[in-house]
Image: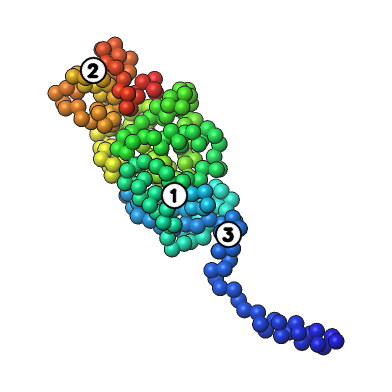
Amino acid sequence: MTHDKTTVVSALEQLATTAPATVLPRVLVTTGLADRYTTIAGPVGPLYVAWNDRGVSGVAPAAEDGLFEKNYADRVGRRLVRDDGLPARLKKGIVHTIETGELGRLPVDLSGLTPFQKRVLETTATIPRGELRSYGWVAGEMGRNRAARAVGSALNRNPVPVLIPCHRVGRSDGTIGEYAFGSEMKRDLLRSEGLDPDGIDAGAERGVRFIGSDTTHIYCVPTCRHARRVTDAHRVEFRSGRSAMESGYRACRVCRPSVAA
């Protein structure tokens, strides 16, 4: 009997084959122990994009695969598995977001963030393409005027930069400010949206915080679509919202410059 049992076990062992290399990654993704990622064309260079059943869960400039995988695992506690391409619905949504600057219906996974951090990102997502707001503006839009510093910290936790445009948020002094992936990438992103970062910084250094039109008597943040249409002959520069209002100007209803006050 022992001999027969040994023979059967030996025969079964000979039937065993090594599982294909694709099996383990599929099992990890199916069981929720891993998410997928791929490389796409971004507005200023290739991007890594990670996703799961909840939506896009990570974005970063494409560089070294291992670094993105490590940072992702450290942040969410799951490993990443390379994939050939995005699901059609996510690809369509990402293309729309990059082209229009609007998140639209693109699902993003913010499940690892606090309620405050989620609100910061949701507010930041409303900033139009080609416009710049301050940390104080984001805080004011949330009804948390004194939370500008906390807003900055929350933006540093943004898992899906470029798609949720933390590059469209600058310092309260009007300058462009820093960026998680370097100030040059931030400037390149803003340039791709039609802004002049050097010109913005130069105006801020002169103390220009708002732009008014002497024909409409409305004042805006310098990058507002309406401010950018004001011709030099009718352009009025202000150092503060108070000085604009004391001069008889009212705040733009589109960019809401008084929110950050």
Is label 1 in contact with label 2 (beta carbons under 8 Å)?
no
CA distance separating discs 1 and 2: 41 Å
Q: Is residue 184 visible?
A: no
Q: Which mark is residue 41?
A: none
Nearest-to-viewer mark from 1 and 2: 2
Q: Which mark is residue 59?
A: 1
Q: Amino acid at mark 2?
A: His
Q: Is residue 241 visible?
A: yes
Q: Which mark is residue 30?
A: 3
Q: Is residue 89 above or below residue 210?
A: below
Q: Earlier in the sequence, mark 1 or mark 3?
A: 3
Is label 2 in contact with label 3 (beta carbons under 8 Å)?
no
Write the residue at 19% across / 27% down.
230
Is label 1 in contact with label 3 (beta carbons under 8 Å)?
no
Q: Amino acid at mark 1?
A: Val
Residue situated in front as seen by the camera: 166 or 19: 19
User: Mark 2 highlights which residue?
Assistant: 217
Pinpoint residue 248: horizontal percent, then vertical percent: 26, 12
Residue situated in front as seen by the camera: 239 or 50: 50
CA distance separating discs 2 and 3: 59 Å
Pinpoint residue 99: horizontal percent, then vertical percent: 31, 46
Write the residue at 50% across / 57% down.
36
Write the residue at 55% across / 36% down.
114
Pinpoint residue 24: horizontal percent, then vertical percent: 58, 66
Q: Is residue 207 left or right of residue 81?
A: left
Q: Is residue 98 above or below residue 67?
A: above
